[in-house]
Image: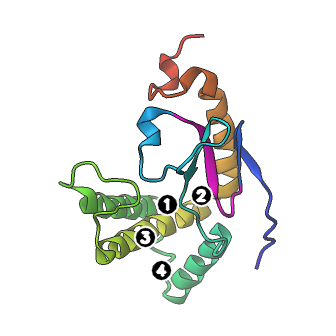
Amino acid sequence: MGDHRQEKFELRNDAPISPLNGETLRAQEHKSVANGPNRADSPVNGVQEYKRCTFSAEPTLEDIRRMQAEFADERNWNQFHQPRNLLLAMVGEVGEVSELFQWRGEVAEGLPDWTESEREHLAQELSDVLIYLVELADKCHVDLPQAVLRKMALNRLKYPASKVHGSAKKYTEYKE
């Protein structure tokens, strides 16, 4: 397997988050967020901690890329797995994820009202989306983890926390 160094990446100026575990996101306490289901019971020094879902360290995106490449090779499916076809297949899978949420109205984080069967179905459909995304990136020769790092850096420039905190406006709507 690949090198699994546990480097920390700064995704926000005030909250280092490990790419391997996500752990806890520190955020300033706000009424709209503080009442959510993942709120820690007490703020520390005026900063509220929110429990986040964490992902396992394995498999890595490279592991997933390799598993899918072997899967497709064993079935001689590469002739069908060209970028356009993979994109359309991924969009179809996103549609299947959408169907699981359709007609439910707002759904609470953590899906507390869903059955285990519904959660497993969602996990399978999200996995299909991820598998197609990773294979599409592979076929387009995009190093997805590095692209994410570049995109997060660009997003930090486009959406400085000091200007956008608590707002959902697009970056083009902010004035200097």
What residue would you read off at disc 1? 83
Q: Nearer the viewer, residue 109 or 129?
A: 109
Q: Residues within 10 Å of mark 2 (few under 14, many from 20)?
A: few
Q: Residue at x 50, y 69 (%)?
A: 131
What residue would you read off at disc 3? 128
Of tags 2 and 3, the one toward the viewer is 3
Alpha carbons under labels 1 and 3: distance apart: 16 Å
Q: Is residue 125 left or right of residue 81?
A: left
Q: Residue at x 47, y 17 (%)?
A: 173
Question: SS for tag 1?
Answer: helix
Q: Position of residue 3 (x, y in %)?
A: 81, 71
What residue would you read off at disc 4? 77
Q: Earlier in the sequence, mark 1 or mark 3?
A: 1
Q: Is residue 8 magenta?
A: no
Q: Residues within 10 Å of mark 3 (few under 14, many from 20)?
A: some
Alpha carbons under labels 2 and 3: distance apart: 18 Å
The numbered dot on residue 125 is none
Q: Amino acid at mark 3?
A: Asp
Q: Is residue 142 visible?
A: no
Q: Amino acid at mark 4?
A: Trp
- Magenta span covers which residues? 18-29
What residue would you read off at disc 2? 140
Instruction: From this view, report whether residue 51 is shown above or below residue 156.
Output: below
Q: Residues within 10 Å of mark 4 (few under 14, many from 20)?
A: few
Q: Quadrant of the C terminus?
A: top right
Q: Quadrant of the N terminus?
A: bottom right
Q: Earlier in the sequence, mark 2 or mark 3?
A: 3
Q: Position of residue 121 (x, y in %)?
A: 33, 74
Q: Earlier in the sequence, mark 4 or mark 1?
A: 4
